[in-house]
Image (cartoon, rainbow, N blue to C red):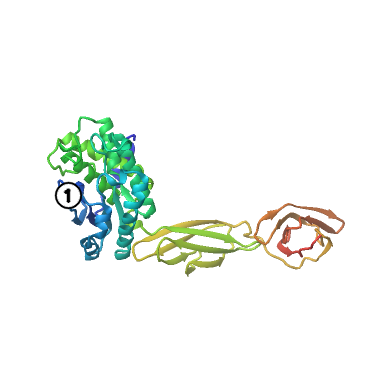
Amino acid sequence: MRINILLIFILFVANFRAQDTLRALFIGNSYTAVNNLPEMLSQLSTSLGDVLIYDSNTPGGQTFQNHAANMVNYQKMAAQSWDYIVLQGQSQEPSFPTAQVNSQTLPYALLLADSAKSIQPCAQVNFFMTWGRQNGDPQWDSINTFDKMNLRLRNAYLRIADSANAAVSPVGIAWKYLRDHHPNINLYQQDGSHPSMEGSYLAACVFYSSFFHKVSMGSTYNPGIDPNTAELIQNVASSIVLDSLFTWQLIHPDSTLQLTTTVEGSLGSNLMNFSANANQEALFTWFFPDGTILFGANVSYDLDLSSYQVILAANGPCSNDTTTITITNPNAGIAEHFNLNWKLTGPQQIAVEATDIFMVRGFDLTAKEHPITFEKKGNQTLISFTKNTSIIQIISAKGLTNIRVPYLID
């Protein structure tokens, strides 16, 4: 992955620097425990002006199935409010054959994620994407090199996170970038599996950007590694995370509430129907440019302006969101009149007693437009339409009107 120096500079300036306080629970094993990754992350955060409050449960060699059976994990989930609950499986298990992962890993990862959300509805579940072993795992051809094993871990953690509607912290991706581009940096201990101090520092920088959505460059915290290496690790970790927040499904705790809106207009009317949806329970407030305020997920409003903006604010138990909707109203300024005389002159034709018509449109009852033609004859205008047309919209020098035509069977 290309390290975008310009992006990093912009993010560094943009994030200079509001303090955040976040809380994270780490449920993992020795990859998290070695070098005390949570404490390293806490010190890194402090050096950058932020606060990380953490707890962990990291007995060695634990699989997702072991985690799911460990009641300590659920007690810690409930012990205080968490912004993040981090889940890490045994180092090999997500890279095993798909059928094995489906039966022995995925169900327990989902059980843990669902339990975390049930116990802490405002917490985000974050999967710790680990790395391939230094020389892979010889027990299976598909993971017998670092690249093979790392790719399978990447894909498995993304699949697990997607199934759990959760995020990942892509430590394994940053790990591969450093191995490919800076092989002189040793990320492993002598066993070729557990992280060296540099490896844990890389993981801490990845988690910092994943949690706070800020770059780790500029941190003065160094656990005892070469300063140039520390600076490079900060750069790589920040770019890997912040270049691809959508891929890793990372959302800042302040933005967990995500709004969607729809707007529908009525034919020949200034009336607009507004609908709001959110991914969590929320109260919706609509602000209109004339000072009107409406409440609820579904509101209707009639404003005779050709273009205007509506602000929607949503307030939920975990966070808030605001969006601005721009409305374009083609009916604005056109007075409606409903006194046109007309009569049916054929199965798909009407005669209107007006000669100042300059636009005619036809719609069915779902507002889908259908072809229509019109011609002036004497003191009338003949309008021809298709058999699916139910509403004819007429615009003349006097204004706009809609005619509901009967549906006739040929």
Q: Secondary structure at mark 1?
A: helix
**Front-lying residue, 148 or 278:** 148
Q: Position of residue 67 (x, y in %)?
A: 25, 56
Q: Furthest-left residue in view? A: 224
Q: Is residue 319 above or below residue 135?
A: below
Query: Could you tell me if residue 362 is visible in this image?
Result: yes
Residue shown at the point (72%, 66%) measured from the top left: 337
| Horizontal arrangement in the rendering, residue 131 relative to residue 402 (left or right) | left
Picture quadrant of residue 107: bottom left
| Location of the C terminus (image quadrant) | bottom right
Check disc 1: other Cα within 10 Å, few if <14, some if 14-19, many if 20+.
many
Quadrant of the image for the N terminus? top left
* Apparent side of residue 356 relative to residue 179 in the rendered image (left or right): right
Horizontal and vertical percent for residue 371? Answer: 73, 52
Q: Position of residue 158 (x, y in %)?
A: 36, 47
Q: What residue appears at the point 30 percent right and 44 percent down from the top-left corner?
A: 170
Q: Nearer the viewer, residue 128 or 230?
A: 128
Say which residue label 1 marks.
33
| Direction right: furthest residue | 378
Q: Quadrant of residue 69?
A: bottom left
Compared across the picture, whether 281 is left or right of 270 comes to: left
Placement of 284 over or under 29, stated as above or below: below
Residue at screen point 41% across, 63% down: 314
Tell me residue 351's x, y (percent). Answer: 82, 60
Residue type, numbered disc 1: Ala
Q: Count the numbered circles shown.
A: 1
In this orientation, does residue 214 appear?
no
